[in-house]
Each structure stands twice: as C-alpha cells, then as structure tokens.
Image (cartoon, rainbow, N blue to C red):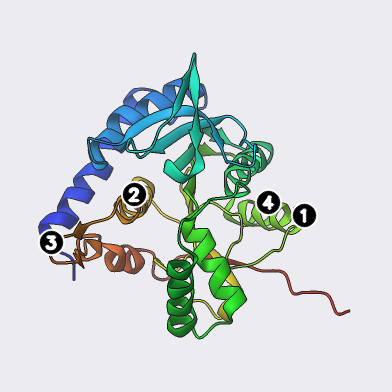
Amino acid sequence: MTNPTVVEWFDGLEAVLEKEASVTGLLAHSSTIGQAREFLVARLLKTILPTGVHIGSGKVIDSDGKESKQVDIIIYDPRFPLMKLEGGGLYPVEGVLATIEIKSSLDDNQLRLSLENCRSVLDLRVMGEHREEAERQIAFYMHKGEITHAEAQHRFLYRYHPATYVFSFNSKTSLDTTCKSITSWWEGIGWMNSNYFPLLPRVIVAGGIVGVTNDGRITLSSDTGNRHAMSVFETNLRFRWFAVHLMDAVSARLGLRNYSERFDYRLTDYYPFDEYKQAIAGAPTRFITAPVAASP
C-alpha cells in the first residue's frame, strides 16, 4: 500500500490541474495545441520531473540517418548532446527519455496522426554498447514472463526505446470507437504486430479515456493472456495515470544507482498503481490484443 500522504499529493495534483485546465479553456474545444503544450509543460511536467531534464520539441534522429516526425514535447537527458535549431532541435534517440504528442481535442484522424508520430520515434534504431548486457536482461524477461527469446527481445527493445505518450484534454470519440481506431491503425501498419513491441504509446489520454500499454511495468489483468497489448478504460483520473507512468519511466531511464554500493534504489513503491487499479475496478475496460498470425 502506498504512503497515504503520497496518494493525497497525487489527488491534489489531479484536482488543481483539472480546475486550472477548465479555467484556461483547455477543457473546451477552442484551445490551440500551443496553449495545451504550454499548460502541460509548465503545470504538469515541471511539477513531476527532475529539474535537470531538458524539455523541448523537434525531431528525434538515429545514427542510421533516420529521423522521426516533428514531436510536440521531447523529454531529454542533458548528459547527451543535442543539436539545437531555430524552433526546435535534433535529438539523438539514445538520449531521449520520452516523447509526448499533445492535442486539445482528439478525433479519429488526430488519434491516427498521433500514433504515427509515436511510431516514427519507436521505429528508430537505438544503439547499445555491450551486447552481453542486453542478453542478460533478455534472459531476465524470459524467466520472469515465461516467454520465448524473441518475445523477450521485443520487450527489451520496447523498454530500451523512448517511452511515447499521447495526451489530449478532450475527445470526440467514445471508448469503443477509440479502441477500434487504435486496433485498426495497429493492424494496418504492416510491421511485426508484436504485443511485446507493439509500436503503441505507453499511455494514451483522450479526454476521460485512458489507454495503458502492457509494457511489463503496469499490467491490468486480462483474459487474453500474452496477446494483451493495451487496456483502455474510462476514468476521471487522467492526469494521475499520465503523471505516475511518466515519473516511473523517466526515473527508470535516468537510473537511481548507488555506485559506491553497486545497488539500485527503488521508487516504484511510492507510485499508487494499486490504488489506481482499484479506482477503475468494475469500470468498462477494453483490451487491445495482438492480431493472430495467419496460417501459412
């Protein structure tokens, strides 16, 4: 059980952000992406993220010469070099902690465009220095999840890539329509359709609808077994789901190691994941699953 004071802090954050978003007009349909981005950076990201991280926008690039589409928000580890440009920058993918696509209101077309932008980041190749370290982590995922080497490798690569997010203050689609749009886009991209590397954002917030990817960190129970890729549900806790997941993803990427003792600290017990799961218990939930491979 999470420290009650921590839960109260997240409750207060949700209430303040919801009220301020309403006062500034972001919960109406007339706000611009610029207003939405400014609010999210100033009022949420600067509240929950370490002061040392860089928050910008631009394109993410890899060493093969590929680049992402223009990204609304890039959260970057300043220990890595970046190439600043007027109106944005070029960010080597290895230093990117997370990317966020911002929308004031989301319809089917805007959702698909946001998924494409996230995919353009996840399609980049992330270079690692020591293959043996990767194999140790892949072996860990194999043992933990009782999955194949290929599946464990997909999981490792997904978590090794930047965490991607979509956040919209409003949505013009229902829960069922949102799920159908995500599923249709995913099935149509023609890639490997792996539920361990699904090319989907870690969290999608579309008004009062939240989708959370089954990425090995936060998992909602499902009767679809290993094909379960994302859980989508209705909730009034959208800021909290988004903030908690982003805090966890960024802290995990930055590392919390005591090098003198060669020991990693753990912060996950501070995040009220269990309480949030209980809050949506009984709410309608849809599970997006990996397509079944066609018979040869």
Q: CA distance from mark 2 to mark 1?
A: 30 Å
Q: CA distance from mark 4 to mark 2?
A: 28 Å
Q: Name which residue lies at 13% across and 66% down.
A: 261
In this view, 146 is above or below 82: below
Q: Secondary structure at mark 2?
A: helix
Circle on res. 260: 3
Report the residue marked by disc 1. Answer: 188
Q: Which of pointers 2 and 1 lies earlier in the amino acid sequence?
A: 1
Circle 2 or circle 1, nearest the eye = 2
Which corner quadrant of the image does residue 69 belong to? top right
Q: Which of pointers 1 and 3 lies earlier in the amino acid sequence?
A: 1
Q: Name which residue lies at 62% across and 56% down.
A: 179
Circle 1 or circle 3, nearest the eye = 3
Q: Name which residue lies at 73% across and 58% down.
A: 191
Counting other residues with Cα less than 10 Å from the Cα at mark 1, is it few (<14), some (14-19), or many (20 or more)? few
Q: Which residue occupies the foreground of this view, 250 or 272?
A: 250
Q: CA distance from mark 1 to mark 3?
A: 49 Å
Q: Which of pointers 2 and 3 lies earlier in the amino acid sequence?
A: 2
Q: CA distance from mark 1 to mark 4?
A: 11 Å
Which corner quadrant of the image does residue 148 belong to? bottom right
Q: CA distance from mark 2 to mark 3?
A: 22 Å
Q: Secondary structure at mark 4?
A: helix
